[in-house]
Image (tube, rainbow, N blue to C red):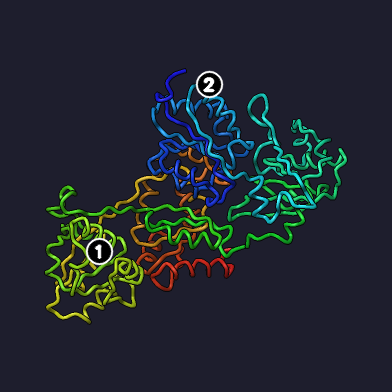
Amino acid sequence: MENLNDFGKVYLIGAGPGDPGLLTVRGKSILEKADVVVYDRLVSPAILGMCNSKAKMVDVGKMPTHHKVKQSEINKLLVKFACEMPSATIARLKGGDPFVFGRGGEEALELVAAGVEFEVVPGVTSAIAVPAYAGIPVSHRGIATSFHIITGHEKEKSDVPPIAALQGDSHSGAEGDRIQCNLSLDFENLAKCQGTLIFLMGIANMDFIARRLIECGKDPKTPLAFIEKGTTPFQRTVMATLDTAGETIVREQVTAPAITIMGGVVELGKTLAWKKNLPLSGKRLVVTRAAKQSSGITSRLTALGAEVIETPMIETRDVFPCCHAGLRSGISDSSENKFVEPVEFEDLKNFDILAFTSTNGVESFFKQLFAAGFDVRVLAGKKIASVGKITEKKLLEYGIRCDYVPDDHTGEGLGLLLQNVVHDESSILLLQGNLADDTLLKLLPKATRRVVYETLPVAELPEWKREAIASADAIVFASSSAVENFVKMISNEKTRHSERSEEFCDSLDPSFEKLSQDDVVKKASCISFCIGRMTEASARKHGFETITSDETTMDSLVKKIVEYYTMGKNA
C-alpha cells in the first residue's frame, strides 16, 4: 500500500434529506474547505451554496431514465481525484446518509482497495427525518415497537436499474412496470411484520410491492403515507391504504423523491403534523444580493417557507489607498470615465459632513479606518448623513448615530435633503463605491467624492446554480448593479456555453429539456422583486416583470413578496 500522504483524503458526507438546516456541523465545515465536491442530484441547492466557492463542483447525480455517471465510474472518479490531488480535501456529498442505501459502502471499499484515506460523515437519514416532518413517529409505544427500512429498488447485474426501479416520475401500476420489477424482498416476512415499514426509492414499484404484501397476508387496510420532497419547502403528504396504493399514486401524481411509510403510526400524522404550510412554502427564490449581505433576507424568506438560492451578482472589495495598485492616482469612475481618489483619513478634519450611500460603504470605511490606526474619535463634531434606514442601521452598529436621513431613500433624496439643511460653506465628503452615479455630485457640486470600495461582477455561475435559476419562481434584486450584472452574466454564459448548449440542456431536469440559455433566463425572469425605484427601473429596462417594495428596506421587500404570493397572484 502506498503512503496515504501521497493522496488526497475523501470524505463521504451525508447531506440529509433536503432541509439545509439538517446538514451536520461536521459536514458543513468540510464542505467549506473542500477542494473538490462530487455531489448527487438530490442534494439541496442551498447546501451546495455552502461549499467552498473555489471548489471544483462535479455533478454525478442520476435523473429519471437519464443516468449521468454510473456508480462504478463514481467510485473510480473518487480514487482519481485522490491520486491526482495530494493533500486535497475531496467531499463526496450524498443525500440522506451515505450508508443507508446510499452506496457509500461501495465507494469506501474502492477507496480502501486503492489505499486512499477516507472518513464517513453520517447524515440524517430520510427514513426517520421525513416521517418526523410529516408528524409521523416511526415508533410509538402501543403501536410500533420496531421499524424497518427497505429499499424499493435494487442493483441490476448491469449496474443500471430497470425503468420501473428508477427514482423518477413514473407512477407505477402499469403491466410493463410490474414485469420489470426484480425485487428479491422477503415479502412473506415483511407481511407478518408488526413494526413500521419504510420504503425508500420505491414509488415506481409501490403498486407491485403493495399487491405482493397483500398476497402474502398483510391487511389491505394498513395505513400508509407517501411523503414527497420531505423536509423541503415542497413537502407533500398523501395518505392511502395498502389496497389503494397504486391508484393513489396515479390519481395524486405522487413523484420521486418520495418515501413510503406503512403501519399504524401513519394515523398519528393526522394529529401530529407540525410543519405548517407557510406563506412561501413551495417557492424557490433567487436572491442576488452580495454574499455577505444576503444572510438577513435569506433567513427571513426561509423562515416563511421559501427555498432560497443565494446567487450574488456582485462582490465588493475594499479600496485601501496604500495597498491597491494604481489607487494613488485614482480609480476609474463608472459615469464619466474620470478618476476619483480613495479616502485619506488624515483629510477627514477638512470635512463637516460625511455622507454614506450604502452598507458596503460603511463597512469598508470603518475597516480601513481601523486598519489605518484610527478610531471613531476622528468623527467627533462631524455630522453624519445616510441614504436610508438600512445604511443608518449599519452605522449604528459602529456606534454612530445619523443626523440626516431622507424620507426618500435614494441618492436624489439624500442630495435634496442636504441642499436644504446644510450651509453653503459646509464641506461634504461622499463615501461611495466605484460604480456610484453622479446624482449626488450634480445636486451637491461642491461636495468631494471618495471611493471606499469597488464593485465587481460575478463572472460565471456553476452549472448547479444555473439549473436552480432555471427552476426558480422569482428573482430578488436589491440593487441596480445586481440587475445589470445578472443580465451581463447571462449574456456571457450564453456565449461561453454556445458550443456545448446541447450538453447543458441534457444536464437539466427533463422538464427543461432543450432549453436555450435565453429560455433559462426567461423562466426565472417572469417575476422579479425589487427594492427601490432605481432597481425597478433597471429590471424593467431588461424586460423583467417587477414587484417593488413600498420602502427601500428589506422588511418592506419581504412583506411585498409575502403579499404577492398570499394574494393568489401566482396560483
Image vertical order of residue 119 relative to residue 293, above or below:
above
> What residue does disc 1 label?
437
Q: Is residue 506 visible?
A: no
For the C terminus, which image quadrant?
A: bottom right
Task: Decide: few, some or many residues near mark 2? Use Cα within 10 Å; few <14, some 14-19, many ≥20.
Answer: few
User: Whole-percent x and y of residue 179?
Assistant: 78, 32
> What residue does disc 2 label?
113
Q: Secondary structure at mark 1?
A: loop
Q: Residue drawn 21% across and 73% down?
A: 443
Q: Is residue 378 left or right of residue 497?
A: left
Q: Is residue 416 left or right of residue 63?
A: left
Q: Residue furthest front?
A: 141
As shown in the figure, which amino acid type bears the numbered disc 1? Asp
The image quadrant of residue 88 is: top left
User: Whole-percent x and y of residue 62?
Assistant: 58, 37
As shown in the figure, which amino acid type bears the numbered disc 2? Ala
Residue nearest the viewer, comparing 356 with 416: 356
The numbered mark, 1 or 2, whose residue comes first in the sequence reads: 2
Gap in Å between the C-alphas at discs 1 and 2? Answer: 61 Å
Q: Residue drawn 72% across and 46% down?
A: 260
